[in-house]
Image (cartoon, coloured by chain):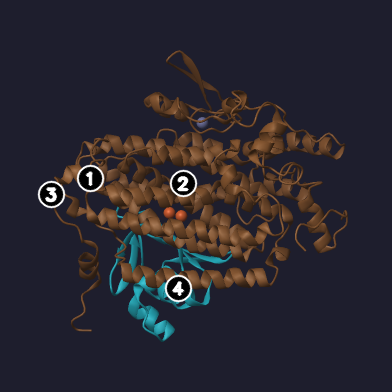
């Protein structure tokens, strides 16, 4: 299984997203690098609307990820309730 | 909420706005997407994984811009250039503005064209949005750099330089090659190779390095651009997958394009290797480490994903694996020797930097490069700073001077030749030769800077005439960092020793 990665800006808006990722993807590895947060996981990584909204206290639209996103590696599956990256093999 | 369409339906409704033409047949309205041999059975199968509609696009892009410009304003207002690690760092930005930002503009034009020429409206809409993104990138980069232009040399004529100066023909020829290809090849060249491989290395580890060196302005436009590039990579990948799924005859064509364009992109990236290892005074990550994470690991995962279509990793991947130990040192050597004819400053690394390089490149730096660099440094300190006065032989395909070594012998310059129509053409490597040999009628027309200079098309004979043609401010834009007005100004502003009373560019 290949590794997916998600790079987010190290800014305040990323905090609830990172917290939600940790909750929903227990095996994800979160790493701090200058000005950015790099998250890796085996096979797939999901960011759920409900979990981020609970963390931040406001409704979070999965497309809001564009405001903090730097880059990622993997295929994208995006819907009203989640943002997911994955490798198929 | 109950009546609101979900994201998929909304996306479909707002992007599938095409129709079957009736006054003219479809293949006459869209004449350019068939001659490359790519067979498409069903354009409706095109699916953009980011279901971005125009209203959402404006909303998010507007918000990103506001944040970015606020940071750039704050950087300027607080004289942010005084907080960078060292003025040498600024030369990476010069190379960026001269070599990369014009490619953003080229990408804007290229995607605008594909946004007209694909038969399928899903592909057209995605290309049009990307075209707008790329225009935003070049604009934010010029704006961000305009602050540095007030205080440092080497920024003022970047667009003029991009079209003329020898080392900038490396990135320029890459994009000219893509923009003169058909629309599907363009998608592999730019959507895949450029976005997936190049931007991930340039806009992620290099930009993180910019932050590490105190440049919050550049890291902000870098990350802001890369958040668009992330969408672009996805589009490039979708284009590849779409071609592969539409017809099995497309597979060998796509494979050849992948092989060609990953190599072309890799050669352009060699400039970034020098930026990361030598031009960032404080380096959080070496070129080799970045290559391992973003190409070997991430690119490897991508190839695993494409394997089910019969796509394989290019044969030359092994060359890249060997070269990652050497690339940045060899490129820096080339730039150092030819810096009299470049609008960047170069320098020899100090002891601390050399030790860092030894640590990051334990198998190669001390053995092959440290002795050479220490010798050059001694020579410079004794007043014999070497500047090459001759023109290098450059590779007909990638246009980089022939300074790379054989993959298995780092003491031997790699050199290949082909003959075409009675003329000899020179190459830096087997893959560059293979690219030429497949389309010699295209590459024999390449605009080669040394040949053009010798033919008298660049201002006249001799280096001074050429540099005047380039519109360099001689002695300010070019030559070693040591002794430059940039150095004098920096020492003055920072109250450092060795400050000489040079004239301060902006007061
Ligand atoms: Fe871009
Ligand atoms: Fe892009
Ligand atoms: Zn070459």
**Which residue is located at x 83 percent, y 34 percent?**
B384
Q: Which chain is brown?
A: B
Asked if the residue at tag 3 contacts the one at tag 2, i.e. Cβ–Cβ closer than 8 Å, the answer is no
* Quadrant (top left, top right, bottom left, bottom right) of the N terminus of chain B: bottom left
Mark number displayed over residue B30: 1
3D distance between C-alphas at marks 4 and 2: 34 Å
Q: Secondary structure at mark 4?
A: helix
Give the labeled residue for mark 2. B296
Specify the subunit that label 2 lies on: B
**Which residue is located at x 82 percent, y 58 percent?**
B491
Q: Earlier in the sequence, mark 3 or mark 1?
A: 3
Few, some or many C-alpha atoms within 10 Å of disc 4 (few <14, some 14-19, many ≥20)? Answer: few
3D distance between C-alphas at marks 3 and 1: 13 Å
Q: Earlier in the sequence, mark 2 or mark 3?
A: 3
* Quadrant (top left, top right, bottom left, bottom right) of the C terminus of chain B: bottom right
The one nearer the camera, B458 or B45, is B458
Left or right: B137 as drawn, with respect to B306: right
Q: Nearer the viewer, mark 2 or mark 3?
A: 3
The one nearer the camera, B82 or A82, is B82
The one nearer the camera, B426 or B150, is B150
Give the labeled residue for mark 3. B23
Dot 4 and dot 2 within a common chain: yes
Specify the subunit that label 1 lies on: B
Q: Earlier in the sequence, mark 1 or mark 4?
A: 1
Please tell me whether residue B327 is drawn above or below residue B292 in the rendered image. above
Give the labeled residue for mark 4. B63
Q: Quadrant of residue A84?
A: bottom left
Q: Position of residue A81 (x, y in %)?
A: 29, 75
Please tell me whether residue B35 is drawn above or below residue B117 in the rendered image. above
Left or right: B247 as drawn, with respect to B398: left
Q: Secondary structure at mark 3?
A: loop
């Amino acid at each position: 299984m290949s590794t997916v990665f998600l790079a987010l800006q190290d800014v305040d808006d990323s905090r609830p997203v990172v917290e939600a990722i940790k909750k929903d993807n227990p095996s994800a590895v979160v790493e701090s690098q200058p000005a950015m947060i790099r998250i890796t996981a085996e096979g797939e990584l999901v960011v759920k609307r409900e979990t981020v909204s609970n963390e931040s206290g406001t409704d979070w639209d999965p497309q809001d990820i564009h405001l903090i996103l730097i880059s990622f590696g993997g295929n994208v599956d995006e819907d009203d309730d989640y943002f997911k990256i994955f490798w198929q093999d | 909420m109950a009546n609101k369409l979900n994201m998929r339906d909304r996306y479909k409704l707002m992007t599938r706005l095409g129709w079957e033409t009736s006054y003219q047949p479809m293949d006459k309205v869209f004449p350019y997407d068939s001659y490359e041999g790519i067979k498409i059975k069903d354009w409706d199968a095109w699916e953009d994984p980011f279901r971005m509609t125009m209203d959402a696009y404006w909303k998010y892009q507007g918000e990103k811009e506001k944040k970015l410009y606020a940071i750039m304003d704050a950087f300027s207002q607080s004289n942010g250039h005084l907080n960078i690690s060292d003025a040498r760092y600024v030369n990476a930005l010069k190379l960026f503005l001269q070599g990369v930002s014009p490619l953003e503009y080229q990408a804007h034009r290229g995607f605008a064209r594909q946004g007209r020429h694909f038969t399928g409206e899903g592909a057209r809409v995605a290309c049009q949005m990307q075209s707008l993104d790329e225009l935003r990138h070049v604009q934010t980069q010029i704006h961000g750099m305009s602050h540095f232009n007030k205080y440092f040399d080497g920024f003022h004529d970047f667009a003029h330089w991009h079209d003329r100066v020898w080392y900038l023909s490396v990135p320029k020829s890459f994009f000219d090659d893509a923009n003169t290809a058909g629309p599907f090849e363009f998608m592999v060249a730019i959507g895949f190779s450029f976005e997936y491989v190049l931007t991930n290395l340039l806009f992620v580890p290099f930009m993180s390095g910019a932050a590490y060196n105190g440049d919050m302005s550049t890291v902000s436009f870098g990350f802001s651009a890369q958040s668009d590039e992330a969408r672009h990579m996805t589009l490039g990948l979708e284009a590849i997958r779409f071609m592969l799924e539409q017809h099995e005859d497309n597979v060998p064509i796509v494979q050849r394009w992948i092989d060609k364009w990953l190599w072309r992109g890799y050669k352009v990236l060699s400039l970034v290797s020098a930026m990361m290892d030598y031009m960032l005074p404080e380096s959080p990550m070496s070129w080799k480490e970045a290559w391992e994470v973003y190409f070997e690991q991430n690119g490897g995962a991508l190839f695993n994903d494409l394997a089910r279509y019969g796509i394989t990793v290019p044969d030359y991947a092994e060359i890249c694996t060997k070269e990652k130990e050497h690339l940045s040192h060899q490129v820096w050597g080339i730039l150092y020797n030819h810096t009299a004819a470049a609008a960047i400053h170069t320098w020899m690394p100090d002891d601390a930097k050399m030790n860092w390089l030894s640590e990051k490149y334990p198998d190669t730096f001390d053995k092959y490069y440290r002795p050479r660099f220490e010798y050059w440094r001694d020579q410079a300190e004794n007043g014999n700073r070497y500047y090459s006065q001759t023109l290098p032989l450059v590779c007909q395909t990638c246009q980089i001077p022939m300074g790379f070594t054989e993959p298995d012998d780092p003491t031997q310059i790699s050199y290949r030749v082909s003959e075409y129509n009675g003329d000899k053409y020179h190459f830096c490597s087997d893959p560059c030769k293979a690219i030429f040999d497949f389309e010699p009628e295209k590459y024999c027309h390449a605009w080669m800077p040394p040949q053009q200079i010798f033919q008298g098309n660049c201002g006249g004979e001799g280096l001074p005439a050429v540099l005047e043609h380039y519109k360099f401010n001689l002695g300010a834009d070019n030559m070693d960092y040591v002794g430059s007005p940039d150095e004098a100004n920096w020492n003055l502003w920072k109250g450092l020793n060795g400050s000489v009373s040079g004239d301060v560019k902006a007061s």
